[in-house]
Amino acid sequence: MELTLVQRGSGTRFVGDHIAPFESLDVVLIGANVPHYWRGLHHSTGYALQWRFEANHPFWQFPESQSLKPLWPQTAHGIRFTGKTATTIVTLIENIAHSSSLERLSHFIQLLHHLAKSPKRDQQRLSTRPFDLASVQIHQPAIERVIRHVLKNFRDPIPLKQVLKLANMSRATFARQFPKHAGKTFSAFVNQVRLESVCRDLTTTTETITNIAFSNGFNNLSSFNRMFRKVLKCSPKDYRLNIAAKD
């Protein structure tokens, strides 16, 4: 499992089928074998704390550890912590980083305690469905290559033939495996990455909507507008105006 803390920086967070922008402070707990990727962490600061407690681990023999049982299955979705829980987690992770021996273990146990008792209002489930890639890890490196390729080249055309060659898979195998790792079809994933970039450009630039759409890989304005409305429940113009009104 992994607890990731971004204290400074921003970018895009991928956890299971979840894709969304993030800004510091960002605290996320990720279960074992859940696919995840942080994009745009240049010049960022933070910590990543990892541990492994399998079902037969002696840790679960302690009666006190049972308080974690309700939280553990939820980590297969990825959980973002906010509010007072996030603030407490920051302090405890910093204590762990600057401690050693039994003192470090003590801070870690305190951290688990605060995760277990965190109120629901401080927990945001990220992925819409749970993930556990333990049984399909043989294909994970290939899918990761494809995802990194998409993140690097989403502004350009991405032919499926090129992707299949990169993954070294047949069309049928790729069509089965990609949703298992990314939570959606390949085309839906590409479109979501492009839409995420469009939303970022709508809020951070004064470029026209047409230019933004085409510069982010959409080559048909009418289909772009339909897709944007379907996913964001508003037009690109209204999205930009709503964000500006909030600021």
Image (cartoon, rainbow, N blue to C red):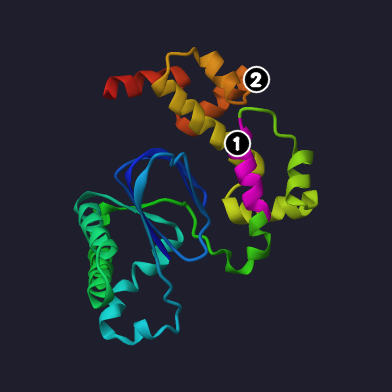
Q: Is residue 180 left or right of residue 120?
A: right
x then y, percent, for residue 86: 25, 53
Q: Is residue 56 left or right of residue 7?
A: right
Q: Where is 106 relative to 25, above or below?
A: below
Q: CA distance from mark 2 to mark 1?
A: 21 Å
Decide if residue 185 is in sight here.
no
Identify the residue shown where x is 41% and y is 67%. Answer: 73
Earlier residue among tags 2 and 1: 1
Q: Where is 136 relative to 217, above or below?
A: below
x then y, percent, for residue 142: 68, 54
x then y, percent, for residue 116: 27, 67
Label 2 environment density (alpha carbons within 10 Å; few <14, some 14–19, many ≥20):
few
Where residue 69 sits, quadrant-wise, is: bottom left
Q: Nearer the viewer, mark 2 or mark 1?
A: 1
Q: Which mark is residue 100?
A: none
Instruction: Identify residue type, mark 1.
Output: Lys
x then y, percent, for residue 190: 61, 37
Secondary structure at badge 1 equals: helix
Instruction: Identify residue type, mark 2.
Output: Asn
Residue that label 2 marks = 220
- Viewer-side residue, 145 vs 185: 145
Locate the C terminus and report the quarter of the image it occupies.
top left
Secondary structure at badge 2 equals: loop
Residue that label 1 marks = 152
Q: Is residue 219 magenta?
A: no
Q: Is residue 25 left or right of residue 15?
A: left
Q: Where is 182 relative to 198, above or below?
A: below
Identify the residue shown where x is 68% and y is 64%. Answer: 138
Q: Is residue 152 magenta?
A: yes
Span of residues in magenta: 142-154
Q: Where is 53 relative to 120, above or below?
A: below
